[in-house]
Amino acid sequence: MTLAATLLAEAENPLIPHAYELVVGGFAFLVVFLVVGKILTPRIQKTLVERTEAIEGGIKKAEDAQAEAQRTLEEYRAKLAEARHEAARLREEAREEASQIKAELREEAQAEARRLIQGAHAQIEADRQQAFAQLRGELGRLATELAGRIVGESLQDETRQSRVVDRFLEELESADGAAVR
């Protein structure tokens, strides 16, 4: 009984599986191993390779984009420096042009002032000549009238009057010229 009890006890040990369970479990393990090894592993490897390539491609694209951004930034800085240089050149040209315009306006103003002064001198000379002519005529009339009073005869004759006036003015001018010297 002890042998039978020992065999029976061994047969019912929960830690030791039955032979049919071992065969079915081994066959199931082989099926799962083959399915995983032949079907799932290549798919997983393919997915991992695709993901790796996608990540590396993304990194490469990011590096390319960063390099392009750097080139664009350098171009922008170069254009900005060129624009600043051009602006400085244009400011300098504007200053030079303003100086030139200022000089031209000053020159024109001076020429206009000279022209006005010359015109004023000419007008003064013309006015002086006119005043002198009027004064000479008035002086002649007064001299004729005075001479007529002194002589006691009328000097209404124009030729006689003209001769008397001319002679009087010549004497007056010669007396003024002698007094000035």
Image: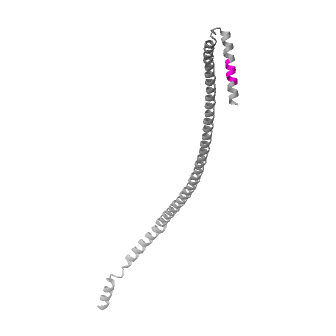
Above or below — where is 140 with respect to 28?
A: above
- Image coordinates of residue 91 in percent, x first then y, are 58, 47
- In the image, residue 41 lies at what x, y percent? 48, 67
State the image coordinates of residue 40 (x, y, percent, origin top left): 46, 65
Name the residue: 67% across, 13% down: 162
Query: In this image, 126 relative to 11: left or right?
Result: right
Q: Nearer the viewer, residue 98 or 90?
A: 98
- The overriding secondary structure of the stretch rendered in magenta is helix
Q: Nearer the viewer, residue 33 or 137?
A: 137
Relative depth, front residue between 177 and 75: 177
- Residue at the extreme bottom of the image, as rendered: 2
What residue sits 62% from the left and 32% below the top?
A: 117
**Left or right of residue 146: residue 16:** left
Image quadrant of residue 13? bottom left
Q: Is residue 85 magenta?
A: no
x, y percent for residue 74 = 57, 56
Q: Quadrant of residue 137?
A: top right
Left of 112 or right of it: where is 34?
Answer: left
Identified at 48% across, 69% down, the residue is 37
> Which residue is at the front of the view, 40 or 94?
94
- Residue 172 falls inside the magenta stretch: yes
Residue 18 position (above or below residue 169)? below
Image quarter (top left, top right, bottom left or bottom right) of the N terminus: bottom left
Residue stretch in magenta: 168-174
